[in-house]
Image (tube, rainbow, N blue to C red):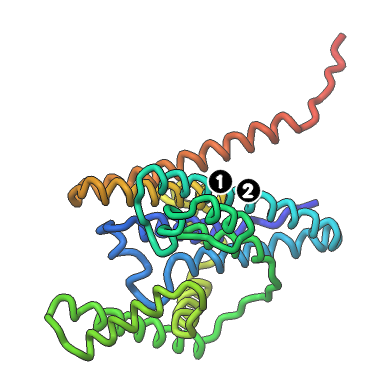
């Protein structure tokens, strides 16, 4: 059976989103002002969720064709179990770091400090997921359908208008911090923060911006583009290939980095080093997992029997 060629765009943009999620969720991190989140209403979490959904669509559609619905469903249940186990590991690490340092990372962490047992029980049944833990339950239900993509000049033009409008609105919303208090700009900044800060619902502005960006990327970046095969892309591709492990590890690293920055208040150089170290550690984990997979596959292959006496 001939396996389809892996779409490198999926691994690359998922890995890139994981790196940006790590950077974006470090409190007080200067580099978070230069990631995808500043260019429009959507952010790296939207990229991760969307690309993971596309990946699941491609995988389970192929499994349904090759193994039937029952076989694909069993594979899906095993994957959900893996994600849930990863979620529990991140929750446990999050709670331990929070209780050990008494650091309030985000909304909901006060409850972790006040009622750790009840908070953990709620997290186990997926009724409470503070911080970056909230993405993993959604990751469990990303199996969906799909269709062939065809680009249109008209739609591309509309997408460019949406992207430009988002960029202009973002610049105006943030400019009030630089040029002084202007009521209109202050209102725009408040609206900007409200849309981007509400992770319980997908605002139509956030969704339209992301879909416009996704359409443009699909239009201009071919599936097997040579750029994504260059050496500098390999760390990002590896993190995207092992997305669950990279996400779980990155979530814990971002919390630990936030605690360190909050307690030490280091300068810009140290902040840059923390980001580089986090990306390097995520890549190192992916390299280790890739090596383990190759070793396991090599051991599982049947060995040729020698006929020599």
Q: Residues within 10 Å of mark 2 (few under 14, many from 20)?
A: few
**Residue at image x 34%, y 77%?**
193
Q: On the image, which quarter does residue 32 sit in?
A: bottom left
Q: Secondary structure at mark 1?
A: helix
**How many marks overall?**
2
Q: Residue 28, position in %: x, y?
A: 27, 58
Residue 198: image quadrant is bottom left
Q: Position of residue 31 (x, y in %)?
A: 28, 58
How packed mark 1 is, by other alpha carbons closer than 10 Å (few <14, some 14-19, many 20 or more), is some
Most foreground residue, 83 or 70: 83
The answer to whether 93 is drawn above or below residue 35 in the figure is: above
Q: Is residue 80 visible?
A: yes
- x then y, percent, for residue 83: 63, 53
Mark 2 = which residue? 85
- Corner quadrant of residue 164: bottom left
Q: Are marks 2 and 1 in contact (CB under 8 Å)?
A: yes
The x and y percentages for residue 233 are 44, 51
Residue 287: mark: none
Rounded to the nearest angstrom, the CA distance separating label 2 from label 1 is 6 Å
On screen, residue 169 versus residue 279, left or right, reads left
Q: Secondary structure at mark 2?
A: helix
What residue appears at the point 37 percent right and 79 percent down from the top-left corner? Answer: 194
Side of 265 relative to 153 (left or right): left
On the image, numbered disc 1 is attached to which residue? 89
Residue 248 against residue 106 in the figure, above or below: above
């Amino acid at each position: 059976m001939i396996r389809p060629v892996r779409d490198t765009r999926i691994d690359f943009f998922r890995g890139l989103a994981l790196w940006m999620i790590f950077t974006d969720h470090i409190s007080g991190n200067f580099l978070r002002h230069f990631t995808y989140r500043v260019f429009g209403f959507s952010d790296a979490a939207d990229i991760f969720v969307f690309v993971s959904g596309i990946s699941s669509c491609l995988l389970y559609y192929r499994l349904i064709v090759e193994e039937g619905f029952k076989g694909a469903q069993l594979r899906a249940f095993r994957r959900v179990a893996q994600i849930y186990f990863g979620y529990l590991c991140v929750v446990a690490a999050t709670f331990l770091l929070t209780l050990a340092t008494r650091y309030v990372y985000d909304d909901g962490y006060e409850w972790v400090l006040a009622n750790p047992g009840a908070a953990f029980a709620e997290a186990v049944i997926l009724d409470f997921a503070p911080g970056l833990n909230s993405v993993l339950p959604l990751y469990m239900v990303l199996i969906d359908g799909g269709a062939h993509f065809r680009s249109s000049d008209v739609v591309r033009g509309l997408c460019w208008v949406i992207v430009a409008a988002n960029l202009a609105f973002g610049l105006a919303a943030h400019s009030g911090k630089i040029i002084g208090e202007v009521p209109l700009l202050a209102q725009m900044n408040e609206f900007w923060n409200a849309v981007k800060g509400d992770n319980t619902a997908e605002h139509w502005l956030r969704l339209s911006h992301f879909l416009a960006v996704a359409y443009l990327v699909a239009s201009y970046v071919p599936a097997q583009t040579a750029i994504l095969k260059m050496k500098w892309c390999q760390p990002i591709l590896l993190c995207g290939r092992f997305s669950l492990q990279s996400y779980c590890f990155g979530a814990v690293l971002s919390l630990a980095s936030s605690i360190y920055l909050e307690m030490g208040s280091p300068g810009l150089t140290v902040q840059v080093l923390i980001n580089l170290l986090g990306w390097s550690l995520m890549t190192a984990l992916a390299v280790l997992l890739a090596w383990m997979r190759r070793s396991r596959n090599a051991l599982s292959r049947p060995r040729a029997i020698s006929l020599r006496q």
